Image (cartoon, rainbow, N blue to C red):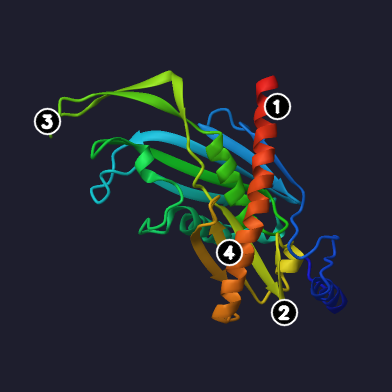
Amino acid sequence: MVGLSEGERRFIRGGIAQDLRSDGRRRLQYCPISVQTGVIPQANGSARVRLGATDVIATIKAELGKPSLLQPDKGKVSIHVDCSPTAAPMFEGRGGEELSSELSLALERCLLGGKSGAGAAIDLSSLIVLDGKVCWDLYIDGLVISSDGNLLDTLAAAIKVALSNTGIPKVNIVYDGSPDDQPEVDVSDEEFLQFDTSGVPVVITLTKVGKHYIVDATAEEESQMSSAVSVSVNRNGQICGLIKRGGTGLDPSVILDMISVAKHVSKELISMLDSEIAAAEASDDES
């Protein structure tokens, strides 16, 4: 990103302090959002989400696999993010690889409950076909096309929309119950089960600039942050995950306030996504 002059930095910080950001938004106001579904026909589900000048695509690919020995009653989900080198100058070379890994890990913590799976927002038990034998493996891929800040929230929104667009083929199993017998699997080409996204959260990142925090920060605003807290919140207002970035420590009372603000703001974002998803699906039906 092009470096900012001292005057530009003061302008950004001063505007946030007065609740009037450089693009005219208030501290807790989002950029305009647009959603497209079914953008990658080969995938089981896909979506493109634009939030301001940040543009990402998420795809969902479902493949039959075998449950792990530690969790025989659950399917598996993996998340991988790729930052296109053309999306931002900092993505060239190692910078893009490091950010891709950081975003992938953050999304897994927010959506899958980390390595332990505790508090997972995606119901892994719904991916099981036959306990201990057959499950669905979901491969979630995110691609950053253009970046102007707030990548984590935009990618999480795209994944939520893509999951709502995902159809899992209906499977018929022939299995006699013997431990050594390999089940016969018949995957339907015509019948699909819609993925349940009611528990999939949105991610709200509150970026602290000076004494105040903002949502949907631009790249310039992020360059002025002292710290940021990302909270994943589902439709029922339940917290599914929390990540802090930045070197400055935060008082516990501040974090609790940020969580409260994130829960409030999440209702607006979920409502915006619901409207965009409904409009995208209506457009797909017409075409």
Q: Residue furthest front?
A: 236
Q: CA distance from mark 1 to mark 4?
A: 32 Å
Query: Are circles 2 and 1 on residues that touch, CB within 8 Å?
Result: no
Residue 131 at what x, y percent from top left?
Answer: 25, 38
- Label 3 or label 1, whichever comes before in sequence order: 3
Query: Are circles 1 and 4 on residues that touch, CB within 8 Å?
Result: no
Between 173 and 180, the one lying in front of the other is 173
- Which amino acid is tagged 1? Ser
- Label 2 or label 4, whichever comes before in sequence order: 2
Residue hosting label 2: 211
Left or right: residue 40 versus residue 241 is right
Residue hosting label 4: 230
Q: Residues within 10 Å of mark 4 (few under 14, many from 20)?
A: many
Query: Are circles 3 and 1 on residues that touch, CB within 8 Å?
Result: no
Q: Quadrant of the N terminus?
A: bottom right
- Which amino acid is tagged 4? Ser
